[in-house]
Amino acid sequence: MLLNPFTSYSLISILALLSLVPKTKEAAIIADAPNIILIMSDDQGWSDVGYRNHPELKTPALDSMAANGLVFDRFYSAAPVCSPTRGSMLTGRHPFRYGIYFANVGHLPEEEVTLPEVLQQRGYTTGHFGKWHLGTMNPWVIESNRGGKAKNQTHYSPPWENGYDECFATESKVPTWNPMVNPPHEVAGSNKQQSPGDAFGTYYWTGPGQLATENLMEANSQVIMDRVVPFIENAVDEQAPFFATIWFHTPHSPVVAGEQYRKQYAHLSEDQQHYYGSITAMDEQVGRLRSLLKELRVSDNTIIWFCSDNGPAAEGGGPGLQAGGRQRGSTGGLRGRKGTLYEGGIRVPSVIEWPSVIRQARSTAYPAVTSDMHPTMLDILNITDLSTSIKDGKSIWPLLQNSSESQRGEPIGFQSNFKGKMYQAWSDDQFKLIHTVEDNIWELYNLTNDPKEQHNVIGDHAKLAEEMRAALLEWVQSCEEDFLSESN
């Protein structure tokens, strides 16, 4: 029997309702402004899509997007784990600049200028749907990995405090099937403190102190899309441009697929059935979204940008080097997995569909990163960001308009703490430098000739390595100084 999580929190809900309401928006709607939808999957490997010729996985909607849009061969998550990457999308900045160093660490500070905040002030109606993971949703409620402790009042930073008009969001992970129900304990990521069939322990929040109580069963991706659909329909009815972040939990643990999706992979192992089935269920909702946009006659002027938040997880759903259990994600042979700064940990699937601008399907080797989303959207809308904050992202608006663009021209920096060690990386159009800080180990890879990072060529390119090393360390220091200035 599913426990009712609401009876214990009536007082908490009343207190939370006293929280500050979102900022008011201006009415200055930009003429012919495109609708913007940023979709993110969770722990989906670079090769976990049909359009990468996966031998088993069925993703017809994503394949159709690829056949009509721009496919990235080298698209990167700003971090090899979820929370930091999510913050980079909304701010255009590396997460080490504002203290989100890893999952379940820090929060999105009030000082950060988020993309929905900027768009909200330009007449967009804004909505967030799915996983949040950028701060606690309620400082008094214990759920998932955080909450219920005094320090988590400091980390209270829900989506409605960061530029969103409408929300349907969880603080962290939930099962990919029956999201409010705890799966069997043998399923990696299940809540061992709760009995199977009881409440999982993370809730869907729709506002301060407000918990969703209906339509929370079957495929979690459908549960999310059921809230996206009326949001878009209402925006179209009101003739307002809309901005939505749809952050699916799939295929993060606990990985559970419904029978109708498992049947599509009946010839495979049970673990594979659940993993592939959960992704196919998510893909089905991407198809539902695209059909809705066409039905409402807004698809041509709607940007859909899909990507994953990091590389595929290992057994148990956490960072690691080997697949196992239901964590069947594929890097396509790239080295490393979630948690590492090798290509398998940060190179993720990504495709953009925008029929009025991207009129012919193409792929690109242009290196792009989740931090590019913020400056790109502002560039498209000709919005000058008044923030003085340093941006790590770069607008790729020229790339969307010009198929001949292939060189980024500016390196992408990475930092992450993995298994107690700090790692840093500096990646340009051809080479990538990796630094293991505690061991003072430096590696250099030619990604053009060696995308699987099998051959450390630092001995052959000493001058280049030194130049990249100096630039990397200067950027790391910049992040440190930025964080210190913002926190003071």
Image (spheres, rainbow, N blue to C red):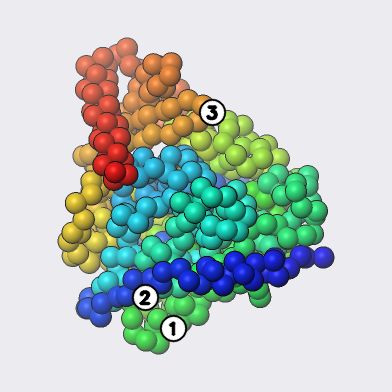
Give the camera-side residue of 356 and 153.
153
Give the camera-side residue of 149 and 329.
149
Q: Position of residue 75 (x, y in %)?
A: 38, 45
Which residue is at 41% across, 69% downward?
20
Residue 395 as seen in the image, left or right of residue 105: left
Report the residue marked by disc 1: 234
The kind of residue on which mark 2 rests is Thr
Q: Position of residue 33 (x, y in %)?
A: 26, 74
Task: Name above or below for residue 356 compared with residue 351.
Answer: below
Mark 1 residue element: helix
Q: CA distance from mark 1 to mark 2?
A: 10 Å
Which residue is at 35% across, 45% downward?
98
Q: Residues within 10 Å of mark 1 (few under 14, many from 20)?
A: few
Which residue is at 28% across, 65% downward?
118
Asked if the residue under mark 2 is in contact with the one under mark 1, i.e. CB atoms within 8 Å, the reply is yes
Which residue is at 32% across, 75% downward?
24
Report the residue marked by disc 3: 419
Quadrant of the image occupied by residue 39: bottom left
Report the residue marked by disc 2: 125
Mark 3 residue element: loop
The kind of residue on which mark 1 rests is Asn
Query: Does residue 325 show up?
Result: yes
Asked if the residue under mark 2 is in contact with the one under mark 3, i.e. CB atoms within 8 Å, the reply is no
Give the camera-side residue of 381 and 384.
384
Give the camera-side residue of 15 and 464.
15
Q: CA distance from mark 3 to mark 2?
A: 41 Å
Quadrant placement of the C terminus: top left
The kind of residue on which mark 3 rests is Lys
Quadrant of the image occupied by residue 419: top right
